[in-house]
Image (cartoon, rainbow, N blue to C red):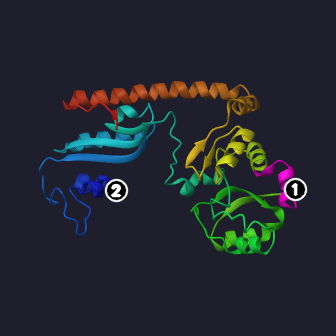
Amino acid sequence: MIALHLNLPVTDLEGLFDGRLIASGHRKLRKSVSETDETPLKVLIVDDSVGTGAQMREIRAELERRALPHRIQIAVIYATPTGAPLVDFYGKTVPVLRHFFAWNVMHHSAINQWCVDIDGVLCRDCTLEEDDEAERYARFLHSAEPLYLPTSRIGWLVTGRLEKYRAVTETWLHKHGITYDKLIMHPADSNAERKANGGIGHFKGNFYKSIDSGLFIESCAWQAKDIANASGKPVLCMETRSMIQPNTTARLRKIARKGPGSYFRFVRRLFENYRDQNRNAGFVQGLQTTSGTQIQKNEKC
């Protein structure tokens, strides 16, 4: 995407090592580069993220070993403080790399450990006119258009749909090739009873709290807040494309439930991150010393 925007040639990492470019179609590139051209170039290597830095150290070491004549810099979208010393540019620093992003969250293998909503995530949400508990709603359940279909098996499908709609829901899921371990539906007999029992967000949040799941993918913003506060755990809202965190009270309740072990794990992670950050900084300094070249100080771009 960057190469297309800047009208520049593009290749992958192996192509860089072997001197190959990816075909650009009929575009007239702003800079003409032949596949055999050995003229030193300005090269930008782009990755989505750097976490602990293990892979980035391998890339840096291989670039050093190959001794390419180009001026090479590395940019990532997300960088942890641990991995940031290994890159030249980053878009944003994050304390912990969660290993899934907006563009791959529905296709990540970890989805088999997550809770996922149905309406507004897997398929479009029904309109107010369709939510009549009668013929129009039945048509919606049979023919709802899919939205974000996952490519991995889902752990828990947790929906506000009533239990009496299980058969038609399972038929729709099977039709669109969606696999899952468990389908959790609201036990109420009617929308009025569901509302009287605390509503959809309360139901989803209590179930999320009761299982060992690290993420809930929810469609609706206000329900996402209810789920986060009821469970004390984060919720990814597809409507706002944002991560909803529980309030302070909910977080404290979660820590109290997990016991003192959670504190020890937190402190251990701090020490491990500090160790890896120093290791990466030392790795970069070692490259500069042995090669005589300078890696540009990383900066937020």
Q: Residue at x 30, y 55 (%)?
A: 12
Residue 266 falls left or right of residue 201: left
Name the disc covering residue 1, or none: 2
- Kind of residue at disc 1: Glu
Residue 223 within the segment the image draws in magenta: no
Give neighbour class at mark 1: few <14, some 14-19, many 20+ (Cα, 10 Å): few
- The residue closer to the viewer here, 250 or 39, is 250
Residue 87 falls left or right of residue 94: left
Q: Secondary structure at mark 1?
A: helix
User: Are the two marked residues, 1 and 2, in contact with CB atoms closer than 8 angstroms?
Assistant: no
- The residue closer to the viewer here, 131 or 277, is 131
- Kind of residue at disc 2: Met
Question: Residue 123, image x and y in percent?
Answer: 63, 65
- Bounds of the magenta span? 187-200
Residue 170 falls left or right of residue 35: right
Q: Residue at x 22, y 45 (%)?
A: 66
Instruction: Give the farthest residue toward the front.
Output: 129
Spatial CA span between label 1 and label 2: 50 Å
Question: Residue 138, image x and y in percent?
Answer: 76, 73
Q: Based on the displayed image, in which of its 4 quarters is residue 15 positioned?
A: bottom left
Q: Residue at x 64, y 48 (%)?
A: 221
Question: Could you tell which of marks 1 and 2 lies nearer the N-terminus?
Answer: 2
Q: How many marks?
A: 2
Q: Is residue 39 above or below residue 297?
A: below
Q: Is residue 297 above or below residue 244?
A: above
Question: Residue 232, image x and y in percent?
Answer: 70, 37
**Residue underneath mark 1:** 193
